[in-house]
Image (tube, rainbow, N blue to C red):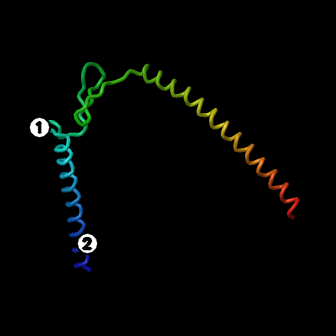
């Protein structure tokens, strides 16, 4: 039993060390593919606090700026108008399905009269 437990623990340790080594190699491969040879891009996401409460965020070397709440609210309002159109399309789809199913049911009942 001790031999089995030792073997299993050894296999688990080898597996986990292989996973960590593979993750490290993948990270180095991504850095080489992106063409960066400097050591400043070892992290995928960097955040730097700037003036006030805003942050400068850099993801894989590309910078992103902080957007105000008002702009987000405008975008949300535009999405809600699009959502209304989607609701209308969904209601129209349900109505067309109901009409189609009703017609099929009536034709089925009519055919049943002659072949029953």
Residue drawn at point x = 25 percent, y = 72 percent:
8
To which residue does mark 2 refer?
8
Q: Is residue 54 above or below residue 113?
A: above
Q: Residues within 10 Å of mark 1 (few under 14, many from 20)?
A: few
| Residue at 70% across, 41% down | 96
Residue at position x 49%, y 26% from top? 76
- Please tell me whether residue 8 is drawn above or below residue 27 in the rendered image: below
Q: Which mark is on residue 38?
A: 1
Q: Nearer the viewer, mark 1 or mark 2?
A: 1
Q: Is residue 78 above or below residue 1?
A: above
Q: Nearer the viewer, residue 46 or 102?
A: 102
Under circle 2, the secondary element is helix
Quarter occupied by the C terminus: bottom right
Q: Report x, y in % for residue 42.
A: 17, 40
Name the image quarter holding the N terminus: bottom left
Q: Earlier in the sequence, mark 1 or mark 2?
A: 2
Which picture quadrant has residue 98? top right
Q: Return the x and y of residue 15 as percentages of the image width and height.
A: 23, 64
For the point 17% across and 47% down, the residue is 28
Q: Horizontal and vertical percent for residue 81? A: 56, 26
């Amino acid at each position: 039993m001790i031999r089995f437990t030792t073997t299993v623990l050894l296999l688990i340790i080898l597996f986990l060390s292989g996973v960590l080594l593979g993750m490290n190699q993948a990270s180095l491969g991504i850095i080489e593919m992106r063409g960066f040879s400097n050591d400043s891009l070892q992290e995928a996401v960097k955040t730097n606090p700037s003036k006030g409460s805003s942050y400068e965020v850099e993801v894989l070397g590309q910078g992103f700026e902080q957007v105000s709440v008002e702009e987000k609210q405008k975008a949300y309002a535009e999405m809600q108008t699009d959502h209304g159109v989607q609701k209308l399309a969904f209601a129209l789809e349900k109505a067309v399905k109901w009409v189609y199913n009703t017609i099929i049911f009536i034709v089925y009942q009519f055919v049943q009269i002659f072949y029953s």
